[in-house]
Image (tube, rainbow, N blue to C red):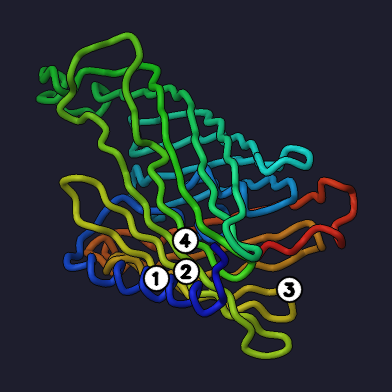
Amino acid sequence: MIFTSQDLKAFFLALMIFIGATISVSAQQKAMFTQYMFNGLLINPSYSSMDEAINVTALARQQWVGFKGAPNTQTISVHSPIKQSRTSLGLILMRDQIGEVISENGVLGTAAHKVEIGDETYFALGLNAGIGKYVGQYSQTGSPTAALDPLFADQNSLRANLGFGLMLFSPKFYAGFSSPFFYYRDLGTDLYSATAYKPHYLLQGGYITDLGEDIKFKPNVLVKYVNGSPVQIDLNANFLFKETLWLGASIRSFDSVDLLAEIQLSPNVQLGYSYDFTTSRLAAVERGSHEIVLNFRIATKGNSSSTPKCYF
């Protein structure tokens, strides 16, 4: 079966309508990465199939500046195609600090394979697996009540994780569904926890088109669902000027309005920054969120001019 450009546009439009129909609630959820559209391996292991170059990406996020114990996250991700095959591999290192007493450090390996289903149109399946060290020092909260409550006992454990991702894409659009932390449990214990992890399901899409000789327009959408929590949606629009500067903005589920900028420092290096203006009640006690992304893109054949440009 060969898909025409009209078929692909109709598919993307239907995806956007479906996403809009599913959003009927609004509430604060745990923040997602603001620059997910430039660092997709963190939310979908099949993302590595979309680029024929080696990518190394470092990210640092400081959430809710000025709020004591606010979350902060650092990640390093690498992904690369394997020779002339349609298989790619990736690696993610992550550090997450939540509050003053909870931290988790982990490593994830990813693998993805793509098949061509139309003219420059591919379907990819990705899997990820990893392990993380979780530390919860609840006894250091300073509350005498918490110190006596077994639910607030300190935790120090290894946690295993399995996830998956699907991606349909071409040089002009992408649409994906993933759950990068689908199976998640403590190692060495069978005890049930009332705060047991629940899978996160992510639906994403994006499209790029020319608005003129030197301007491209790329809208993106990301939807997150966790059982028992409200659906979270992120709507984004980015403009690329002269293949050098990205400028954009996002709205996240009545939680924040975000501004983004990405600049091509060289043919192989891209630097991005985003700032989140909180629109929830937390705005009274914090000063927004900062996120910095640095990406290195290395042609596998040693010649960047022969490697197709990837806008996703």
Between discs 1 and 4, the one toward the N terminus: 4
* Label 4 Cα crowd, 10 Å radius (few <14 / some 14-19 / many 20+): many
The residue where tag 3 is placed is 244
User: Where, by quadrant of the figure, is residue 277 drawn?
Assistant: bottom left
Say whether residue 228 is left or right of residue 205. Answer: left
The residue where tag 4 is placed is 175
In three-dimensional space, the C-alpha distance between marks 4 and 2, rounded to whole angstroms, equals 10 Å
Asked which secondary structure carries label 1, the reply is strand
Q: Nearer the viewer, residue 88 or 264?
A: 88
Asked which secondary structure carries label 4, the reply is strand
Dots 2, 3 in contact, CB < 8 A: no
Q: Nearer the viewer, residue 195 or 74?
A: 195
In three-dimensional space, the C-alpha distance between marks 2 and 1, rounded to whole angstroms, equals 6 Å
The residue where tag 1 is placed is 235
Dots 2, 1 in contact, CB < 8 A: yes
Instruction: Pick out the residue farthest to the bottom.
Output: 212
Q: Quadrant of the C terminus?
A: bottom right
The percent coordinates of residue 80 (x first, y second) are 70, 42
Instruction: Pick out the residue farthest to the top.
Output: 188
Q: Quadrant of the N terminus?
A: bottom right
Q: Nearer the viewer, mark 1 or mark 4?
A: 4
In three-dimensional space, the C-alpha distance between marks 4 and 3, rounded to whole angstroms, equals 25 Å
The reply to whether residue 312 is visible in this rendering is no
The percent coordinates of residue 280 (x first, y second) are 25, 65
The residue where tag 2 is placed is 220
* Label 3 Cα crowd, 10 Å radius (few <14 / some 14-19 / many 20+): some
In three-dimensional space, the C-alpha distance between marks 1 and 4, rounded to whole angstroms, equals 14 Å
Task: Determine the residue positioned at 27% across, 69% down.
Answer: 254
Q: Residue flagged by tag 3: what amino acid is it?
A: Thr
